[in-house]
Image (spheres, helix red, strand yellow):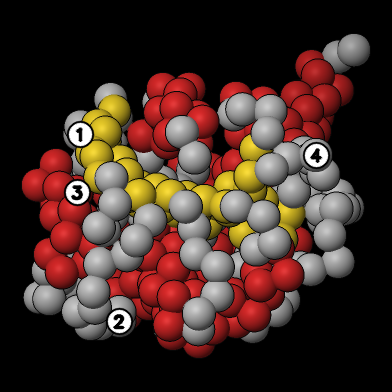
């Protein structure tokens, strides 16, 4: 192979490697479009279907997230627990469906979709935006006199009454500023932020999800009956321990706070420690 051929080969190899990296990022962000989720309900995905389970753990994603976040969780939880990861419209293999950008219509749609799966004891886990969704969904289930979770795990989100009302509505930022905010939050892969095609795919999803959280208006209600565990990262700049302790006002049941090494996305970096705590609480139900 002469110098010219070697250069051409290197160029093609570089393109191939970049293409493979992009495919991997696409898979991480949007999911495997060919994998069946074990259910005809497009809101539900079961990473490891477990019909013998006597307890379900419904897992709600953070902004921009999809069920792949929870794909390995069944292997670290008690054998009697079936993980059901929630897939929102416009995310994962539901790309192309209209996105929700307000919380109230979203939780009403979720309640209707979940109701057939509330036929055995269950718990909710939600991280960041997912914590807010799971909390308000629990309140809606109570209002509708439907079954409610035995335990609510709220992760990476301050108690709703402590939310900063003057916080910037980042979903309305110009594109360049919005991308800088994504870099600050440290939850979007660098490959996405540095790749225009992937940014074009991802920003509408993130803007809609941020709008769900940032347009939310808290309304005071009586405490929930379920146990509640608030989870946080020791280096999370936006959610301090005090914000998590304030969740106690939202339950008449058992309450505790657990902190983990890491920033806002400690559920990735401290995954095994987090799952140990969740397992311990689920075994008590």
Q: Position of residue 21 (x, y in %)?
A: 67, 37
**In the rendered view, would you say 148 is above or below 238?**
below
Q: Disc 4 and disc 2: Cα gap in Å?
A: 40 Å
Label 1 environment density (alpha carbons within 10 Å; few <14, some 14–19, many ≥20): some
First in sequence, mark 3 or 2: give its number.
Answer: 2
Residue 51 vs residue 49, the one in the foreground: 51
> Is label 1 in contact with label 3 (beta carbons under 8 Å)?
no
Which labelled disc corresponds to residue 52? 4
Mark closer to the observer (1, 3) = 3
**Residue at the location (32% across, 65% down)?**
224
Q: Which residue is mark 1?
A: 235
> Is label 2 in contact with label 1 (beta carbons under 8 Å)?
no
Label 2 environment density (alpha carbons within 10 Å; few <14, some 14–19, many ≥20): some
**Residue at the location (57% across, 52% down)?**
122
Q: Position of residue 269 (x, y in %)?
A: 41, 27
Q: Give left or right: position of 36 versus 262.
A: right
Instruction: Specify the quadrant that holds the N terminus.
Output: top right
Residue farthest along the top direction in this orientation: 1
First in sequence, mark 2 or 1: give its number.
Answer: 2
Q: Disc 3 and disc 2: Cα gap in Å?
A: 20 Å
Q: Which residue is mark 3?
A: 244
First in sequence, mark 4 or 1: give its number.
Answer: 4
């Amino acid at each position: 192979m002469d110098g010219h051929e070697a250069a051409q080969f290197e160029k093609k190899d570089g393109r191939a490697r970049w293409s493979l990296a992009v495919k991997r990022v696409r898979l991480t962000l949007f999911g495997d479009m060919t994998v069946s989720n074990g259910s005809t309900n497009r809101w539900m995905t079961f990473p490891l279907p477990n019909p013998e389970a006597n307890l379900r753990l419904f897992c709600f994603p953070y902004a921009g997230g999809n069920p792949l976040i929870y794909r390995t969780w069944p292997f670290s939880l008690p054998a009697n627990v079936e993980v059901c990861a929630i897939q929102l419209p416009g995310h994962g293999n539901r790309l192309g469906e209209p996105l929700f950008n307000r919380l109230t219509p979203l939780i009403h749609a979720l309640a209707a979709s979940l109701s057939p799966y509330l036929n055995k004891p269950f718990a909710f886990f939600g991280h960041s935006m997912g914590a807010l969704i799971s909390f308000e969904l629990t309140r809606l289930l109570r209002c509708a006199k439907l079954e409610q979770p035995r335990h609510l795990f709220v992760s990476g989100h301050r108690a709703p009454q402590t939310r900063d009302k003057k916080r910037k509505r980042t979903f309305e930022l110009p594109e360049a500023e919005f991308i800088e905010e994504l870099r600050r939050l440290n939850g979007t892969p660098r490959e996405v932020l540095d790749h225009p095609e992937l940014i074009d795919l991802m920003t509408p999803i993130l803007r809609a999800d941020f709008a769900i959280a940032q347009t939310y208006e808290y309304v005071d209600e009586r405490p929930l009956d379920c146990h509640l565990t608030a989870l946080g990262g020791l280096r999370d700049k936006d959610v301090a321990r005090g914000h998590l302790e304030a969740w106690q006002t939202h339950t008449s049941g058992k309450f505790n706070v657990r902190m983990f090494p890491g920033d806002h996305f400690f559920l990735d970096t401290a995954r095994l420690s987090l799952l140990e705590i969740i397992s311990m609480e689920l075994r008590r139900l």
